[in-house]
Structures are given as structure tokens and as C-alpha cells.
Amino acid sequence: MREARGHGVRDDATGDRLSRFTALILRHKPETVGIELDASGFVEVNVLARAMAAQPGWEWVDEAALRALVLRDARRYELADTRIRARYGHSITIDAPGTVVVPPEWLFHGTTSETLDSIRADGLRPQQRQFVHLSTTRQDALAVGSRHSADVVVVTVLARHAHAAGATFYRASPSIYLVRAVHPDYLQIPAGSHGLS
């Protein structure tokens, strides 16, 4: 696709660059382009497009480019009529990052072996984010954890039991669920530093 108004994103490199900038704004720093997000993390697409296009080097960004980005990366971004938001990964305060749901029986969280003692004591807690990210499959959790470390372990979350005990789960995308925290009682934590089973 061409990098021109109304024609979306020109190529993969430009799309990746646009995705990183959009994520920075919608997850962490909306104030850097002079916008505010609502309590659920949404902003009008046209407001975001104008704010981004006002930044040096981003003059080409328009609504079509942002809509094309969402189509290209629907796991990361969500469109709701005329509004856009990041589905997950927020360091800024978001009240409701997705649809409140009854979760599947099990969910999975990829982490490093050095965090296991802390998880055993305190459960799963968000680090630099507002929510703990959980995957629907062990393989996805392993892949997510591998982005941060080569020494990855997968913690199994007894999600349905945690939900019954009062934990609120949000479905951010078909394969990602979010929760503010999970008590250690609802976790199956590998015993060893490389326990993936």
C-alpha cells in the first residue's frame, strides 16, 4: 500500500513504525500528542489521526492509515465505530480494558524462572502494566515470555476458580485475557527453574 492520505500504510516497515508509535500513544503516553483517552482507553480515530499527523515526520497519518493498522494488527488494536484503542499493554490507568467474561478453565502466563519465588509468595501481579496478560495456550504464553528472556517458564492459571473467588477477567482479544492479579492459590507454578510442564 502507498504512504498517502486515504491509502493506508505503504509497506511492512512503515506499518511496524506506525504500530509502535500508536502503541506508545494508546498504551503509555497519550499526552505526548495532546490527546486524552476515555476510561476504557478509547479515543476518536479522527482525533488520534490529527494529533499524530501534527507530529514531525508523521504528516501522512490519517484515519485510513489507522483503520488499515487495525485490520493489519487486530490482536493489538480495536475499533468500535469511530473510536480506537489498544487492546492490552497499558501502563496508564484504564478502568475496563475489554469485555468482562467468565474465563476458560485454564489460562497461561509466560515468565522468567527468577520471578517464581515472588509469584509463589504474591501471585501474579502486573509489573510495568495495569493488568496481568494471560494466554489461551501454553505455546502462546511461552512465545510471549520469550520476548523478554530465553529462560522462560509457563505458569498455569486456574482461571475459572480464580473467577469464582472474585477475580475479574477481561477478554482483550481471542487469545489474550487480562486480570489485575491472581492469588497464588489459583496458580500451578513449576517447581524447577525450567519447568514447562
Image (cartoon, rainbow, N blue to C red):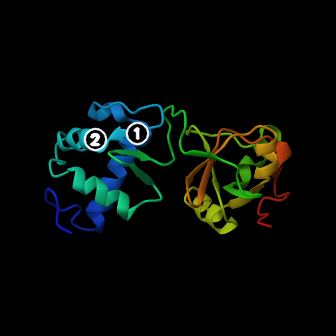
Camera-nearest residue between 3 and 194: 3
Q: Mark 2 points at which residue?
A: 48
Residue 160 picture location, percent across and down? 78, 51
Q: Residue at position x 70%, y 58% from top?
A: 108
Camera-nearest residue between 32 and 195: 32
Residue 113 picture location, percent across and down? 73, 54
Give the answer, above or below, for where 136 lies relative to 62: below
Give the answer, above or below, for where 155 lies relative to 181: below
Q: What element carries label 2?
A: helix
Q: Which of marks 1 and 2 is nearer the N terminus?
A: 1
Q: Are marks 1 and 2 in contact (CB under 8 Å)?
A: no
Camera-nearest residue between 191 and 168: 168
Q: Residue at position x 47%, y 59% from top?
A: 75
**Residue type of the residue flagged with mark 2:** Leu
Give the answer, above or below, for where 33 lies relative to 185: above
Q: Residue at position x 40%, y 61% from top?
A: 73
Residue 42 has which mark? 1
